[in-house]
Image (cartoon, rainbow, N blue to C red):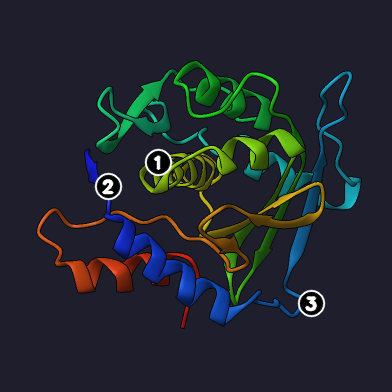
Amino acid sequence: MKKRIFSAVMLLALCVVSVACGKKKVEKTPEETQVVINIPTATPQVTTDAAVQATTNAAVQATDHVEDGISIYHGDDNAEYIIEDKIPKQEVTPELLLSELEKRGILKKNTRVNSLNVKKSKENGTTLALDFSKEFQDQLYQQGTAGEFIMMGSVVDTFLKAYEADSMTITVNGNTLESGHCIYEGDMKFYEPDDSVSADKAAEAIAEALGAE
């Protein structure tokens, strides 16, 4: 399914909302479980706590019941839309998604995932906290407004869909992600715009996808 690339005006409107809202804090409840997936630089592997192994299995192998494969999102050849590819069903890992995004030109080859934190709670559903290496922000700084939207949208949609998550945050070496256009402090949600959406509604919808209230 194709997704429209919104204008610079819309993205800048998003930035104002994103900066104003700041970072959302989620209170941990007794019903909440948390899994931290650390990605070592040398030999990538998934490390989990035995107490939440069942939760980890459900998160890491999120596509066990998805028969049509894993969705990978990326820009089309003309950088006008975000489109969806399918790869064969297999175990979902941060390395797999990173590799597929690299193949499609969304991320550069030297970009690494430092860690992936998967939380499940009754209040917020499944949330992801994804931490990238510095190369991710360096690449984001090189993008224009359209390129930035494609890059961020492709990464967010790919990880949310693969892990069946409701929202996510992205940081770089533990710090807030920034670009030349935006400060990404809010929780980001999967966003699928309607082809007929107006400019005003588009800006509002993108702001909502980034966790603005």
Q: Given the image, on which type of amino acid does mark 1 rest? A: Ile
Mark 1 or 3: in front is 1
Q: Which residue is label 1 attached to?
A: 150
Q: Given the image, on which type of amino acid does mark 3 rest? A: Pro
Mark 2 touches mark 1? (CB < 8 Å)? yes
Other-residue count near label 2 (Cα within 10 Å), few / some / many at <14 / 14–19 / ≥20: many
Side of 117 where 121 appears, left or right? left
Percent of width and height locating residue 199: 19, 67
Q: Which residue is label 2 attached to?
A: 5
Q: Residue at x 63, y 67 (%)?
A: 185
Q: Residue at x 34, y 31 (%)?
A: 75
SS assignment at label 1: helix
Mark 3 touches mark 2? (CB < 8 Å)? no
Q: Does residue 120 sit above or below 18 in this rendering? A: above
Q: Does residue 48 sit above or below 167 in this rendering? A: above
Q: Residue at x 56, y 44 (%)?
A: 163
Of the image marks 1 and 3, the number of the one nearer the N terminus: 3
- Residue 203: quadrant of the picture: bottom left
Of the image marks 2 and 1, the number of the one nearer the N terminus: 2
Side of 134 where 190 appears, left or right? left
Q: Given the image, on which type of amino acid does mark 2 rest? A: Ile
Residue lying furthest left in this view? 196
Q: Does residue 141 sit above or below 97 in this rendering? A: below
- Residue 22: quadrant of the picture: bottom right
Percent of width and height locating residue 151: 47, 39
Other-residue count near label 1 (Cα within 10 Å), few / some / many at <14 / 14–19 / ≥20: many
Mark 1 touches mark 3? (CB < 8 Å)? no
Asked if residue 91 can be seen in this view, the reply is no
SS assignment at label 3: loop
Q: Which disc is residue 30 wearing? A: 3
Q: Does residue 164 sit above or below 92 in this rendering? A: below
